[in-house]
Image: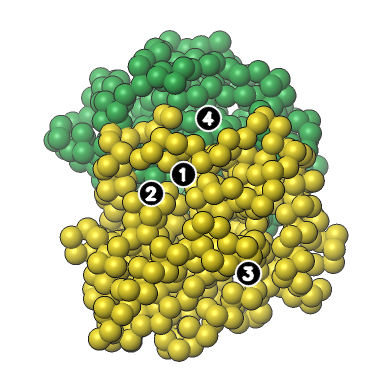
Chain colours: A yellow, B green
Amino acid sequence: MKKFMNRAETLVAESLAGFVAAHERLVVFGADSRFVRRRNLRPDKVALISGGGAGHEPMHVGFVGEGMLDAACTGHVFTSPTPDQIIAAIRETDRGEGCLLIVKNYDGDVMNFEMAAELAAEHRIATVIVRDDVNPSGSKRSQGRRGVAGTLVFEKLLGAAAEARWRLDDLSALGEDLNDRIRTVGVSLSGVTVPETERETFVLNEDEMEMGVGIHGEPGRARLKFATADEIVETMLKAILKDLEPKRSDKLLLFINGFGGTPVSELYLAYNSTRARLQSLGLTVARSLVGTYVTSLGMAGLSITVAGLEERELSLWDAPVNTAALRWGG
Amino acid sequence: MKKFMNRAETLVAESLAGFVAAHERLVVFGADSRFVRRRNLRPDKVALISGGGAGHEPMHVGFVGEGMLDAACTGHVFTSPTPDQIIAAIRETDRGEGCLLIVKNYDGDVMNFEMAAELAAEHRIATVIVRDDVNPSGSKRSQGRRGVAGTLVFEKLLGAAAEARWRLDDLSALGEDLNDRIRTVGVSLSGVTVPETERETFVLNEDEMEMGVGIHGEPGRARLKFATADEIVETMLKAILKDLEPKRSDKLLLFINGFGGTPVSELYLAYNSTRARLQSLGLTVARSLVGTYVTSLGMAGLSITVAGLEERELSLWDAPVNTAALRWGG
């Protein structure tokens, strides 16, 4: 395993320090460097806080800024942030309108964010649990659907709504609603080596791929023979469309996400194939995003996220965003 | 070799089709899909055209848009675009103020862009050859310094200047000037497999790295023992600073570029280490960029680019840019 690092114990802290320094106009460290927050907090909006284990960069710190998150808490690699970190973020970013916690559905994350919300009971807090994975069967890390790349879509839409001064109850309702309308499936071409343990999570032969993977190198639903991009996309879309059941009148957001080790040219090729297949089914791709946003260290692979959005959500998607990783409009 | 593709012969065309479809608000294909251009060409500005082999995405197509390139011509993987492609781009984008061709210093690229300029002699054309690599010794592909990740800096600064309606001669002079002030050095942790040949360019052991690599998987200057991030950065910066000789009063742009297979968290860690080292030498990092912009397929590794910029160039760097890969201001 070759990684650019000094010591496994300090790699998350060093990387975050680099992130904050490189984007000093957008973000600062919160108290005791326990989280990253927007440099300029707004007085009369709900604070949006997310977080999770390290190893998924640029999520979540790359989504802190105008039109998206107010703060992000990062744990060790693939390990939830502690309740302390989350409480510190709540205290520093809540300006009186309450906090919305956006939490991916993993047992550790859900437990620590819940504990933080209980311990910070003097604040008004609502929680959205993101469950966008098509795989409903859970894993060692989670019960039910996992939160994966669709988390970006939750954070963009809720971030825009919070920026437009939606109230906490309305944001919470939107978050619940989105769980029925966003689905993701991932495929991996390689396992993942976690720096602290130097153990590879699973090993694939040269002619194999792992279908239905999450973002922690956990095994997926099936090990399949490697195939052409068109065939892989067909398998993936079948799983999504069976679950999402979009109508021909729906406006779809199509998001192709790289897991960290996949060149952007391959992501665009996958996008091309996915879009063509959706169109051949009479479906309309109204918005698109292609890039490396929600990663699993340096895993080779990608995920496809499809969201069925109404006019209201399309406007939230189009609203200006100014973060390190996502930036448009304004 | 596992790649998301259908056939090696069509992968560049399919990927470009996906790119154009995903960014249809920004770009369109030029005539016969031989190049990618800005959707909205401006009437009274010099047209900026670049290009090169595929395999370096998001460069150059990701830099087409307001404040950067007017058109980009893509060849096969690691192969120059043909003169035909370049001539088509010149004819379609020159609105009377002439064209500036931005060409990385590889024999194939230089030859084909020169030939295009000769065959399109009815247009006013100037050419900037980018030579930012610290390695002055050339390779099989080039004589003298290669054009590598610093190409992004050329295209951003010249793009902003063209947007500000600088004339062709002044743009050409700025380009020449930048060649003395931008230096890059790359390190690789893995070779590269070119899809057409399925041959790996070089093979590294688990404890080795290749120092001084370019962006085609060509071997570098030295094969070294793998080391900590701080040690690698020290070796790389030494090569840059010996060549660039910045003064303490200089304002530096520091750009950490991933080669395609390196997680963004490692790029930020390398940024943190590089910035700290520059500061310990009394040097000032005034602007920063960290990300995967100039790649060598899925190569694991990164490059460090340092540019010594004056107030004029800092303003050009800060000017709004709206492309698929680089976007700020505006």
Q: Which of the labelled discs sits on residue B299, or is there none?
A: 4
Alpha carbons under labels 2 and 4: distance apart: 23 Å
- The residue nearer to you, when weighing A300 against B158, is A300
Q: Would you name the residue on which mark 1 appears?
A: A297
Say whether mark 1 and mark 2 are on the same chain: yes
Say whether mark 1 and mark 3 are on the same chain: yes
Q: Would you name the residue on which mark 3 appears?
A: A182
Alpha carbons under labels 4 and 1: distance apart: 15 Å
Write the residue at 62% across / 63% down.
A137
Q: Would you name the residue on which mark 2 appears?
A: A77
Above or below, A183 relative to B252:
below
Residue A237 makes an appearance in the image: yes
Total marks shown come to 4
Say whether mark 1 and mark 4 are on the same chain: no
Closer to the observer: label 2 or label 4?
2
Indicate the amino acid at tag 4. Met
Above or below, B287 relative to B1:
below
Indicate the amino acid at tag 3. Ile
Closer to the observer: label 4 or label 3?
3
Write the residue at 31% across / 39% down.
A8
Q: Relative to B250, is B182 on the left or the right?
A: right
How far across and down, in percent of the image, does residue B181 sit?
Answer: 33, 30
- The residue nearer to you, when weighing A19 against A222, is A222
Q: Relative to B244, is A313 on the left or the right?
A: right
Badge 4: chain ID: B
| Element at label 2 | strand
Which corner quadrant holds the C terminus of chain B?
bottom left
Q: Earlier in the sequence, mark 3 or mark 1?
A: 3
Alpha carbons under labels 3 and 1: distance apart: 23 Å
Write the residue at 25% across / 86% down.
A122
Above or below, B144 relative to B70:
above
